[in-house]
Amino acid sequence: MSAKRISRRTAEQMLRGSSAGHPVADLLNSAAAHGREEELSGETEVMAAFQAAFVDAPALSTASALPAPAERNREKPSLRSLLAKAPTALIAGTALAVTAVGGVAIAANGGVPGQKKAEKPKASPTSVSPPFTRKYAPPPSPAPVATPSNADLCRKYIAQGMKDENIAPLVKAAGGRKKVIAFCVTLLGADKNKPAGQWPPPGWPTDWPTTWPKGKEWPTEWPKELPKEWLQPHGSPQDRKKAEGEASAERQSFWPQEWPELEFWQQQDEDRPNN
Amino acid sequence: MRVDRKVAQRTPPDEAELSACVRAAQQGDETAFRTVYRDLQPRLLRYLRALVAEDAEDVASEAWLQIVRDLPSFRGEYDGFRGWATTIARNRALDHVRRRRRRPQAETTLDELTEVAGEHDTELSALSGLGTERALKMIMRLPRDQAEAVLLRVVIGLDAKTAGQVLGKRAGAVRTAAYRGLKKLAAEIE
């Protein structure tokens, strides 16, 4: 077979490892050959980091171990530097690795690419970590944080419409773009500046649920998205005015009767010196 | 994530076992994590060498740190884990390149490469006589997109679709880049 003549089909076979005898296929097989011991030189450190993250040493939790973004730009984080901050974790990890070496030989255990057999994930004498021992918080759930910034953002979002990039904090706080409006209703419902009367509407939750039922829309009667024209009118001043008029009409059609008039929130903004 | 049948044949036959290892590692099983590490680390290291040359080990360490940190959030089987971990490693490598503002230079000529292979390489690939180091260096001399496509497909063991996800390209673009790379390799060998 001529080395220069490689059809797409032959190339695909080579890439999938199902073609042999061609010089290029042999080259690829060489590139994908078994891992070598020197390629696993960082194993001890990685295992120590794993143990520190999953088993113990809160001081080496990822939140404290990873440098801040600004710091990361200045100094490349390395396992060595991180482990230097947690000597107990390093000792434990090293001890683990040393004890593991007795029963694990890289060339023989089949744990590198192309090897026949891998270790089974069974608990072993060297495995001292019980399952589910990692000390990390459960996945963040949307929770109302009645900070002025979120409340202000909600008011602006609802009253004026905001560009997408400006509502990112609300999307994050609400747990999704479609929940922003519901989030704001709940958040503003607990606002000390809320209007008098029936507020929030009867039956409306007073807290943002900490556990959101998977796949459940909440609340079902609330609009899921604001009109795009409402968020960011484009075009000439005349077009924008027209779009704003249409958006306003559309907004009113979405608006629950219990919701205060937009002027209320606009007045709130004007009354706030920092806004 | 779709499993490439042929790739699965190239990779160790205990793919399901490695998937179980990933799940066990997510629950804190160190032995399982070690198995995963030993399978993946040599692959990542070889791929990273094409991106950051001699800094590959440092970048791999950074990548594993993030892999450990984000491990609980991973969902999927082992082939998906390979793609996920490779994406992390690639991102760390790109960060590294941005920091250093330089790219690895493949200065080695083909003639020089023929002298690189050591004895252990010869043992590893007695079939072809091409050592692993020499093979990798030849691949690294390809244009970067072609080298990455070939390495992701061959060394990491990803199918075209998953490799495309790692690179942010379509599967067809990955196939084309890899095909061109193989043609160049063939021309050089001949």
Image: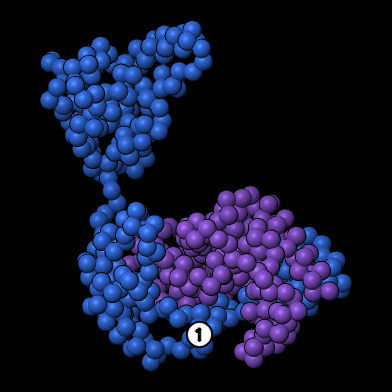
Chain colours: A blue, B purple
Name the kind of residue labelled 1 in the image: Glu
Near mark 1 (Cα within 10 A), the count class, few <14, some 14-19 or many ≥20, is few
What percent of the width, then of the height, locates residue B20? 43, 69
Question: Residue drawn 39% across and 64% down?
Answer: A76
Q: In the depicted view, which residue is nearer to us: A198 or A236?
A: A236
Question: Can you tell which quarter of the image residue A45 is in?
Answer: bottom left
Task: Residue B171: give x, y in percent of width and height.
Answer: 65, 52
Residue identifier under label 1: A37
Q: Residue at x 65, y 60 (%)?
A: B144
Depth check: give the residue in front, B135 or A192. Answer: B135
Establish if B20 lies above or below B174.
Answer: below
Q: How many numbered tags mark residues here?
A: 1
Q: Chain of mark 1?
A: A
Give the residue at x 68% y 68%: B141
Q: In the image, is A13 to the left or to the right of A59? A: right
State the image quarter where residue A189 is shown.
Answer: top left
Q: Residue B79's x, y, as percent?
A: 53, 64
Q: Say which residue appears at 28% left-offset and 27% top-offset.
A: A154
